[in-house]
Image (cartoon, rainbow, N blue to C red):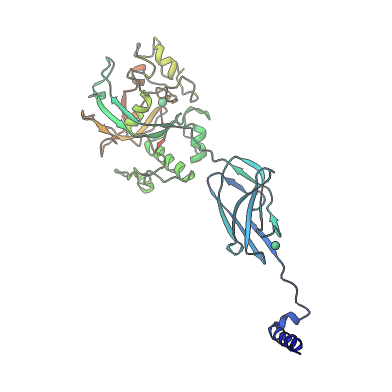
């Protein structure tokens, strides 16, 4: 009797707990599914960027696992997140590969899973080859017998670490970023010339934008050619070198007229034996620019610091003072900007590491180009 009563009681409770829908013959068991929304076939992910994997799903066991097969190799787990998050962000790591796939699956039992079409992972390639310099202290200016009064007084300068392009900006690089090539001597790997200081600064900002860096120059001030250009010294974007950075980089620890020794012959002829090894100037240029990187670099690995084209510096031109300085940025105002290094058109004496001259910022000529730095 007691057993019967218990069974009857359980049956009654069971009857009360059964949901109505369970009795409906048309109801299907809940189906699991995942649809991948991104990445799609043909996507390229760039190393260092944040890539987003997105999906919609139903009925998984709460969590999904996101995996990557790099170039057809075995699956590696990128992460496991709640299925209802519908997205997973991954900071892309190298190496480069094509034919990569992403898989999203129920983390509890692996089923269901869905797989992307083929995508590529590519390394980010900066347009310029930059050399990192650790910074240091040097004597700026010259007391050489060839030096001019405006290279003096020699004064002690300390510069902080920065990166500098190993070459002058080429015409191919300028064309790619700005869509134009103003050069007189045409050639993809020759330095760009006939550029004003404004053109050079605009190139810096355009390249910074393209590489996701913070712009150094204020765009409005460049466009209006303002007498005072606002500059963000804490920005990580590209800019022209300060005059001190330029000389520090050119000297590469040397104290001689050129980074490979002293000047012997100041004009075009006879050929100066040291300068001939490191730079294009009136003695060896055949009256034109040459492809960058064609002569011997200095010990920092920088080419064409002497000759080929003059290089715009960031600073206003002004007289030196005798006190020691750290990271000098030149006069606060002026009418001309510094140019450095001499050109294919210059006498040997104008290609010395300490030699300095200037142009109005709006001036361009077929002997002036530029190279970039950033911090
Ligand atoms: Ca499952
Ligand atoms: Ca040069």
Examine the rendered structure and indicate whether residue 196 appears above or below residue 273: below
Is residue 123 toward the left or the right of residue 303 in the image?
right
Q: Residue at x 69, y 59 (%)?
A: 109
- Indicate the quadrant containing the N terminus: top left, top right, bottom left or bottom right: bottom right
Q: Nearer the viewer, residue 126 or 299?
A: 299
Q: Quadrant of the C terminus?
A: top left
Could you tell whether 19 is left or right of 336 in the image?
A: right
Task: Identify the residue at the far top of this view.
Answer: 270
- Judged left or right of residue 301, residue 110 is right
Q: Where is residue 63 in the image (x, y as percent from the top left)?
A: 62, 61
Q: Tell me where residue 121 sits by quadrant.
A: top right
Residue 315 in the figure: left or right of residue 201: left
Q: Where in the figure is residue 83, as x and y percent of width and height?
A: 61, 62
On screen, residue 285 above or below 170: above
Give the camera-side residue of 232 and 163. 163
Q: Residue furthest right?
A: 25
Residue 183 position, x and y percent, is: 47, 31
Up-down relation of residue 162 to residue 33 (above or below): above
Residue 297 appears anywhere in the view: yes
Q: Quadrant of ligand 2?
A: top left
């Amino acid at each position: 009797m007691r057993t019967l009563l218990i069974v009857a009681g359980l049956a009654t409770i069971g009857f009360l707990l059964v949901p109505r829908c369970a009795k409906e013959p048309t109801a299907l068991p809940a189906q699991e599914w995942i649809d991948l929304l991104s990445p799609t076939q043909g996507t390229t992910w760039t190393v260092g960027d944040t890539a987003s994997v997105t999906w919609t799903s139903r009925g998984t066991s709460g969590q999904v696992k996101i995996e990557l097969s790099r170039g057809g190799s075995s699956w590696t787990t990128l992460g496991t997140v709640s299925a209802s998050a519908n997205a997973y962000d991954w900071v892309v790591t190298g190496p480069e590969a094509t034919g990569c796939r992403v898989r999203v699956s129920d983390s509890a039992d692996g089923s269901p899973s869905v797989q992307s079409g083929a995508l590529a992972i590519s390394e980010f390639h900066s347009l310029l080859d930059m050399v990192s310099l650790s910074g240091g202290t040097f004597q700026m200016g010259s007391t050489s017998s060839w030096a001019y009064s405006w290279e003096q007084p020699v004064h002690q300068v300390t510069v902080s670490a920065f990166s500098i392009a190993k070459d002058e900006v080429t015409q191919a690089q300028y064309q790619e970023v700005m869509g134009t090539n103003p050069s007189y001597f045409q050639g993809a790997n020759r330095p760009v010339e006939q550029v004003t200081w404004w053109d050079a600064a605009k190139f810096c900002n355009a390249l910074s934008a393209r590489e996701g860096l913070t712009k150094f120059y204020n765009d409005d001030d460049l466009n209006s050619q303002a007498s005072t250009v606002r500059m963000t010294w804490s920005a990580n974007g590209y800019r022209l070198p300060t005059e001190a950075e330029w000389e520090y980089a050119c000297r590469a620890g040397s104290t001689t007229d050129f980074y490979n020794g002293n000047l012997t012959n100041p004009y075009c002829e006879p050929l100066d034996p040291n300068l001939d090894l490191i730079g294009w100037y009136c003695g060896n240029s055949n009256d034109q620019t040459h492809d960058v990187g064609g002569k011997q670099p200095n010990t920092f690995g920088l080419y064409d610091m002497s000759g080929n084209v003059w290089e715009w510096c960031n600073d206003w031109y002004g007289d030196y003072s005798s006190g020691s300085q750290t990271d000098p940025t030149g006069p606060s105002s002026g009418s001309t900007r510094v140019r450095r290094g001499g050109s294919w058109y210059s006498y040997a004496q104008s290609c010395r590491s300490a030699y300095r001259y200037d142009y109005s910022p709006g001036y361009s000529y077929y002997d002036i180009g530029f190279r970039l730095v950033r911090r």
